[in-house]
Structure formats: C-alpha cells, structure tokens
Amino acid sequence: MWSALRLAQKVGAGLGEREILLPTLSRHLDLDRSDAAAGNVMSVLRIILGDQLSFDMSALAGLDPARDIVLMMEVMEENTYVWHHKQKIVLVLSAMRHFASELRQRGISVDYVPLDAPNNSGNLTAEIQRAVARHAPDCLVVTEPGEWRVQAMVEGWEDMIGRPVEVRADDRFFAGRSRFAQWAQGRRAWRMEHFYREMRREHSILMEGDRPAGGEWNFDAANRKSLPASVLPPDRLRFAPDETTREVLLLVEQHFSDNFGGLEEFGWPVNRADALRALGEFIAKGLPRFGDYQDAMKAGAPFLFHALLAPALNLGLLSPREVCRAAEAAWRSGAAPLNAVEGFVRQILGWREYVRGVYWTLMPAYEQRNALKATRKLPAFYWTGDTPMRCLREVIGGTARYAYSHHIQRLMVTGNFALLVGVAPREIERWYLAVYADAFEWVEMPNTLGMAVFADGGQMASKPYAASGAYIDRMSDFCPGCAYDVKQKTGPNACPFNYLYWAFLIRQKNRLANNPRLAMPYRTLARWPSERQTAILAEADDFLERLR
Ligand SMILES: Cc1cc2nc3c(=O)[nH]c(=O)nc-3n(C[C@H](O)[C@H](O)[C@H](O)COP(=O)(O)OP(=O)(O)OC[C@H]3O[C@@H](n4cnc5c(N)ncnc54)[C@H](O)[C@@H]3O)c2cc1C
Ligand code: SF4
C-alpha cells in the first residue's frame, strides 16, 4: 500500500527545482497499485487559481512537463459572489490567460477552461470533477487558496474525487500562516508595529546589523503632509490592452454589462513583464515622495505618489520580497529617502502580512464581528457617487472610473463615513470586496472590519479611525468646492462629518470612552453642556433619517 509520504516523494520527482512540502493526509488513495509497484511515475493535475499567477507557486514545484497538466478555470461563481467592478473581472481573467500562455511557452500542458466554454459548469468544484474525468490523474496538487470560502471547497475535493489532494503552503508571503499564528499565540493584544519589527529583523530588511536603518523603526510622523499645489504627482503608467485583454474586455461587456464601474480607464498590468515595468516606474517616480504625501488627497488626482501595485502583488505577478528589496535598493543607492522607503516597506512587510495573519487566524468567526452593533444598510450613493458631499463624491467617482482609490481615501472618507453612520460591517465589507481591482478577501476583510469600521473591537487597530471634517479638510482640497461648510459644526450647511463624528462618540460612549487613544475627544465632550450634546444628536438623527 502506498503511503501518503511516498506519494509525495513521487509527486516531487519531476523537475525537482524546489523542495516539496509535506503532503496533507491522503485518505482515499485510489491508485493502480500494479502500476505503482512497477515504479511508474504518477501523473499530477496541478491547480492554479486566479490569484496564483507565478512560476514560483508551490503547486508548480517539481512539475514534470512530460506527465503533469496544469488546470486553470474561469468560473461564473468566482465572478459573481460579489458584484465585482468590471475592471477587476477583466484584470483577473486577462492575467490568467496571459499566465496560461506563458506556461505553454515553457512547454507545460495547460488545460484552460474559459468562462464561455460550452460545458463550463460555473464552479470550481464541478470543474475539478470534470477535469479529473478528462485526465484521470493519480493525484491533485494545489497551493492553499487565499480565501477561506475557497479553502472550504478545496477541503472537500479529496472525498469527492477519490484521489489524494496535496495542499501546499503559499510561500509567496514573508510570514506563512503558521509563522503568524506562532507570533500571535499568547499575546493579549496584537499590534502591527510589534509584528513588523520582528519581520524586519527576521528578513533583514532596512536593517543595519541588529538596529533599524537610520536608528528609527518608524517614520510615520514625517509622512503626513498635505499636498501643496506646487507639487505635481507623476502620470499614471497605463498599459494599453493587448489582443488578449481586448477579448476579455468584450467578454466582460457581454456578461457583466450591469456591473459596477467603467472599463474606459482600464490600464492595469496583466502579465509579469508589465508588472515589472510598473514596479520600476514607481521606484523611479513615485517612491521618493511616497512618504511625504502618503496620506494626502487631491480632487481629480486619485493616484498621487502611490504604487498602484496591489493588484499585481495580489495576483502573484510580483512578489512582496522583490518589491521590498527594490525599494530598499533605491534607498541604499540614494534614489529615495528613508522616510519614503520605510513607509512603503511598512505597508507590505508590515500591514499586508499582518492582515493576512489576522484573516487566517480569526476566520471564519471574524466575518461576523460587529463590536459596535452597527445595522444600517449601505447608502445607495456608494454605488452612484450621487451625493452633495464632495469628498465622498470624489472618492466614489474615482473608484467607479479606475477601480482604485488610495488607502486614506478608503479609510478616512468612505470607511470613516460608514463608521460614523453605523453601516453594518458585512454591508460595507462586501462593497470594498466588490469595487477595487486589488480586492481579495484575505486583505480586504481585516482592513474593513478591523481598521475602517472597528467591527473587531480593537483586535487589529488600537482605536477606531473616526474623524470629523477637519481631518479631511487638512489632508485634501475637497472642502472648498463642497456644498457644505467644513467650518460649521451644526446647522443646514454644516459639514455632516462634524456632527456625525460627535454623535458617534456620544452614542458609543459605553464602548469607547475607556480607550486611552480617545481620551482627548472624550475629555472635550465631558466639558460640553448636555444641551449641546442633545443638539448634536438631533442634527445627526435628522441627517440619518434622510440617508437612503
Ligand atoms: C477599507 C479598506 C479596504 C482595503 N481593501 C484592500 C484590498 O482589498 N486589497 C488590497 O490589496 N489592499 C486593500 N486595502 C489596503 C490599501 O488601501 C491598498 O493596498 C492600497 O490602497 C493599494 O494601492 P497601492 O498599490 O497604490 O498602494 P500603496 O499605498 O502604494 O502601498 C503599497 C503597497 O502596500 C500594500 N498595502 C498598503 N496598505 C495596506 C494595508 N492596509 N493592508 C494590506 N496591504 C497594504 C499594498 O500591497 C500596496 O500595493 C484596503 C484598505 C482599506 C482601508
Ligand atoms: S465639507 Fe465635509 S462633506 Fe464636504 S468635502 Fe469637506 S469633509 Fe467632505
């Protein structure tokens, strides 16, 4: 009888370019034993999911081009589980098609199931079943999926097909799932900063011996400038759609014409060569000022000095290691200042890895968290941008047009508003998952539940990111052109963020007043006469009653 370990050794006996990981338990070995006894090498069906588009995927390690087949599937279920922005669908499908063609160019057999293939069943599990019937592989190999929902499917495959399914770790990340769990174990509070410093040391990034480069771990204080009119951000590098992307654009217009967002501005990199160009462009033109203007917002300029690399990173076209190393090299060669490079590395080696750890450690219960008991439906203008509040109009308009907005727009405009008016966490979470080209649940959910709407009660962030209009006014040029007056605290022309902010703090007093990071606003509130608080609540109620 074949043991699971022996099976894994056989599977790994192909190209042998990387070490193979231990197999998962194989409970239903259904192999032709005489064949196995004769020492024949087994055929392996290797699954590549839509966000695993890298030659370095663990699922491809040890691939034998003579016997193995790579299976890639476009299925309707993955394109409809939320109302994805059209650009996101084009991006994923086009990048998948490009990657399949690159695999073929390397002499690898790819069984590619297009979305409109006649017998496409529309879901991953049924497509696996059909592919097993077509190829009769001895076993399946897949890299652990990025989302809990898909992992639950993968866990059912072995029973379903009656053959071993080996699930390998996704080693594209600095910290694997177990590394994060090890870090988190026994800690009362998880803080990104602590995790990030450990990652800096462990991976020797921006270190001078055992000390942080420049003597500081954190340059955030230097990275909160508003943007002067004299500073002009670089143009966005757009990639003109090639023939493959043009085909997908047509397909998406055919099948998803009612979905959110426009396709006119599509210009995302869809293959590794273009992703590398985008990285080079950012390092040369964006990175030097990334730190200074990281939190700034400007009307009509959604990109500023941001990298626009999240879609390529999340799909696997770029690796977080090479991106951090490129940024560090720019600092070491004097091409970018340390505050910019540290600020950038912190986003990837710090936040990106940290949110993934939070996701995998706390799912599936995490998605149900609602610490502030918020129940409101998502306001309709999140889909249309039709609101007199200029900040929201700008950010939602940019989101529809580009499938992009930068972090502070997400956190402090759309997220802040959802927090202040009490949108149910699941409603706003599904919106963020739908509307951005870079949206994948493992990164989007903790950012939404943990950072934007504080639904996890402080597991991820030490305080809710609630702010009044003054913050938006300081960091952007939105307010001068708005129908509301950011300087007015109450009254029909007052900026709604102002009274909504104070009403939020008053209503959430029992839950938040003990948070040391909110001590200052609660001290201010305590000085207000009760009539002032009552007037603020009445103003907020009036606004909320009209909010649809
Ligand atoms: C409510 C909300 C939802 C979000 N949803 C997503 C999402 O679905 N997918 C996603 O990749 N990011 C998400 N983010 C994080 C961040 O906003 C985006 O990564 C960033 O805006 C992408 O643009 P950029 O590539 O120009 O990033 P830059 O600002 O140039 O940052 C560089 C890189 O750092 C990483 N990064 C930066 N901030 C974060 C963060 N908070 N968490 C994880 N990685 C980060 C990204 O890979 C990004 O490409 C979300 C943030 C918020 C507040
Ligand atoms: S005045 Fe208020 S609503 Fe208008 S743009 Fe400024 S912060 Fe937004």
Image (cartoon, rainbow, N blue to C red):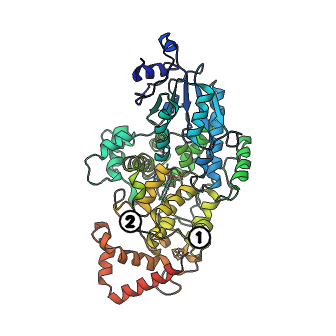
Residue 408 visible here: no
Q: Which mark is residue 381?
A: 1
Q: Amino acid at mark 1?
A: Phe
Between 19 and 320, the one lying in front of the other is: 19
Q: Kindly indicate the quadrant of the structure image that contains residue 200.
A: top left
Q: Which mark is residue 72?
A: none
Between 358 and 317, the one lying in front of the other is: 358
Q: What residue is drawn where x is 44% and y is 24%?
A: 19
Give the residue at mark 2: 464
Tag 1, which secondary structure? helix
**Vertical side of 189 occupied by 277: above or below:** above
The answer to whether 397 appears left or right of 290 in the picture is right
Between 250 and 296, the one lying in front of the other is: 250
Residue 75, image x and y in percent?
62, 43
Residue 165, image x and y in percent?
48, 30
Q: CA distance from mark 1 to mark 2?
A: 23 Å
